[in-house]
Image (cartoon, helix red, strand yellow):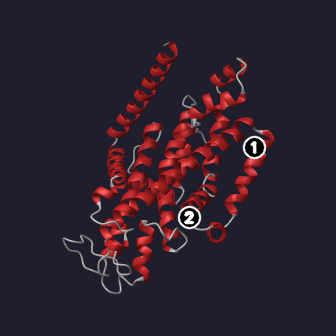
Amino acid sequence: MKVLKKIGTAILSVLRSVGSFFARLWKHKQGRVGLIIVTFLILVALFAPLIAPYDPYDVTQRAEKGLTPSWQHLLGTSITTGQDIFSMLVYGARVSLSIGIITGVLIAILGATLGVIAGYVGGAADTIIMRLVDIMIVIPTLPLVIVITNIFGNSYFVIVFVFVLFGWQSLARIVRSQVLLLKNSDYVKAAELAGASKGYIMFRHILPGVSNLVIMSSALTCAGIMIAESGLSFLGLANATSISWGKMLADAQSGGAMLFGHWWSVLAPGIGIFLSVFAFMRLGLALEEILNPRMKRKSGLVKVFKHLNNRYLDELFASMDDGAAPFVQSPEPQKKSKRRGET
């Protein structure tokens, strides 16, 4: 009974923490917008068989090719195979969202784990991980992706593996730099004096300290991965048997949809990609302001433009320096002497 009570108490504590977190996210304007859109897209993906009027994978439910939008086919049919575009849009949300979310979570786990090990353990582990990061960053990604997909196939398992393989380096470096600051904190030193193992300290004390970076990075990574998957599908490097928004764009381009005036074939998947990326970007920016109160509350568009010219990172590190030394007083300016000849 005592064990069950402890388990129940732990579950209630986790539920309260999660509820409090989502409540703070809901109060944030950008977070609310992103949360609504992401929830809507997830529900569409989960209930795709109930929402889509046709099954795009069923060849018996395909009509004539290149039909214009009508009540029977809300977004018309594809110009190459005659599939219902609205049904393809709904089913494509499953592939695009699943790849983005699964890959984002795996990158967060791998990058955070290696970053914590490199920052806290140090020594040979730090050297090996950081040199591996340096090597992986300079490797041209697209040619290697083409080689890997040609050797191991273009299944979505391989695509996720490739994205994770080339996506964890930046997060690992950021987490390592934060861990180097946390390892000298009082509560970590107290845990070491109490005889706690390094593994316990890393995953019980240090990892929660960098969780804000990991959560924020996961949201932003999901947006980037969805764009990357769409690009690979458009180039024909993804799984040809599954329907994704990138594959819809590739089919429309190969069939000459814009040439024949079938703009809805391109607009439908384009809107799906835009909404998903926009939502995850809103969540990422909102999480950044919620989990890092020292960040200034500026619009996401301003942050994006500042990020493009490196001003955003400069202000971020400046705000961290200001928070780290709030009591340092600037030296008083020397008074100018009114006498001639005095300096």
User: What secondary structure is found at the residue carrying circle 2?
Assistant: loop
Quadrant location of residue 305? bottom left
Residue found 20% across the figure and 74% down from its top: 70
User: Hey, which residue is sitting farthest right in the picture?
Assistant: 124
Residue 88 screen position, x and y as percent: 36, 67
Which mark is first along the chain, 1 or 2?
1
Residue 307, relative to residue 141: is it above or below? Answer: above
Residue under pointer 1 = 126
User: What secondary structure is found at the residue carrying circle 1?
Assistant: helix
Q: How crowded is mark 1: few (under 14 residues within 10 Å), some or many (20 or more)?
A: some
Name the front one of labels 2 and 1: 2
- Can the viewer see residue 75? yes
- The kind of residue on which mark 1 rests is Asp
Label annotation for residue 155: 2
Label annotation for residue 254: none
Nearer the observer, 305 or 152: 152
Residue 67, relative to residue 136: is it above or below? Answer: below
Residue 2 screen position, x and y as percent: 50, 13
**Quadrant that contains the C terminus:** top right
Give the distance between the C-alpha atoms of the residues marked 2 and 1, in whole angstroms.
Answer: 34 Å
